[in-house]
């Protein structure tokens, strides 16, 4: 009785192990097929086909470059659909307060504001990268002084540094690994994050790669120079922060006054935008506010 029970348990265990092995093999085969099916289904979706078509256009390539500069990982089609939805919703809600053509203007302004947010994110990421350049130069200098080649030093910088410098250095190392020349890879980096500091660093690396010389000494001197420029940029930005804030107050003051007027007397905006005199006055006011914003920003823009 006991021997039969033990034999039955052993048979069940062997059968279970056999089924587990078969299931493992089937899962591996299914995973391979599933990966291929996922790629095929992904390429067959209309959103992905639309994304590919957008990337082939000049505007699509330009927008993709801006997304790369800002560090946004969205698809091109998602960006376009989000902008279209934003414009449509803005037009629907604005048409209840304004005339139809002012509602169109509000929709276009909403899209432009969204692109301005993208510009701000791009500028902030570029400033963060420029702020990390002294650390990048130090890491490259320490790695090369330890006997590593420049490509290995770049790969180490991509692993050790935080984003965005770490991400960009890792991308640069990947381009070098797949056979991209150093000059072209550095040009791609300069195209994604254009700045004088990065241009100075890339030119130094290119000259050292071509002519040779004391790479460690050059990178250490570059690190000190970039650190001094970083401190100077911080001081200038602190001095001009009040004027920049004033420019944004001027920009939103006009829109806020219009909304306040409509809250006090409901329907005022619709009446103003429906008459010719009101339309002319609003256009003149918008031009003056935009001109004031542009003048303040021009006077506070200092290239270092």
Image (tube, rainbow, N blue to C red):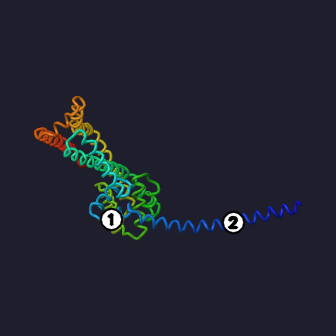
Residue 143 rendering spot, x and y as whole percentages: 45, 59
Residue 28 rendering spot, x and y as whole percentages: 59, 67
Looking at the picture, tell me which residue is in the foreground, 69 or 166.
69
| Disc 2, SS | helix
Residue designated by label 2: 19
Q: In which quarter of the image is the N terminus?
A: bottom right
Residue 98 rendering spot, x and y as whole percentages: 21, 40
Left or right of 285 in this view: 87: right
Looking at the picture, tell me which residue is in the foreground, 30 or 172.
30
Q: Which residue is at 16% across, 37% downward?
A: 272
Where is residue 165, by image quadrant? bottom left
Is residue 228 at least partly visible in the picture?
Answer: no
Where is residue 92, by image quadrant? top left
Residue 18 rendering spot, x and y as whole percentages: 71, 67
Cα gap from disc 2 to disc 1, whole angstroms:
47 Å
Within-10-Å neighbours for mark 1: few <14, some 14–19, many 20+: few
Q: Which of marks 2 and 1 is nearer the N terminus?
A: 2
Where is residue 291, by image quadrant? top left
Instruction: Please give the label number shown on residue 53.
Output: 1
Looking at the picture, tell me which residue is in the foreground, 262 or 159.
262
Q: Which residue is at 72% across, 65% downward?
A: 17
Q: Is residue 225 above or below residue 8?
A: above
Is residue 274 at least partly visible in the picture?
Answer: yes
Q: So how many labels did they put on this image? A: 2
| Disc 1, SS | helix
Q: Say whether marks 2 and 1 touch (CB < 8 Å).
A: no
- Extreme residue in the right direction: 1
Within-10-Å neighbours for mark 2: few <14, some 14–19, many 20+: few
């Amino acid at each position: 009785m006991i021997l039969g029970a033990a034999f039955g348990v052993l048979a069940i265990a062997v059968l279970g192990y056999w089924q587990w092995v078969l299931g493992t093999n089937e899962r591996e085969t299914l995973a391979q097929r599933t990966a291929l099916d996922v790629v095929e289904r992904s390429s067959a979706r209309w959103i992905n086909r639309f994304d590919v078509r957008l990337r082939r256009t000049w505007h699509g390539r330009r927008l993709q470059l801006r997304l790369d500069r800002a560090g946004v990982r969205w698809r091109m089609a998602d960006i376009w659909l989000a902008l279209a939805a934003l414009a449509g919703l803005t037009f629907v809600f604005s048409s209840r307060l304004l005339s139809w053509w002012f509602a169109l203007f509000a929709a276009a302004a909403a899209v432009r504001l969204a692109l301005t947010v993208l510009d701000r994110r791009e500028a902030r990421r570029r400033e963060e990268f420029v702020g990390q350049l002294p650390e990048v130069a130090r890491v490259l200098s320490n790695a090369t002084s330890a006997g590593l080649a420049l490509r290995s030093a770049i790969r180490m910088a991509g692993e050790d540094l935080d984003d965005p410098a770490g991400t960009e250095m890792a991308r640069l190392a990947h381009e070098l690994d797949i056979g991209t020349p150093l000059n072209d890879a550095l040009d791609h980096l300069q195209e994604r994050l254009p700045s004088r500091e990065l241009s100075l660093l890339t030119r130094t690396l290119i000259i050292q790669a071509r002519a040779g010389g004391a790479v460690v000494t050059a990178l250490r001197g570059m690190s000190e120079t970039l650190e001094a420029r970083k401190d100077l940029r911080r001081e200038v930005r602190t001095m001009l922060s009040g004027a920049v804030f004033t420019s944004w107050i001027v920009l939103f003051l006009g829109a806020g006054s219009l909304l306040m007027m409509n809250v006090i007397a409901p329907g005022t905006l619709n009446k103003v935008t429906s008459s010719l005199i009101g339309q002319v006055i609003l256009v003149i006011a918008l031009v003056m506010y935009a001109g004031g914003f542009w003048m303040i920003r021009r006077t506070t823009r200092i290239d270092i």
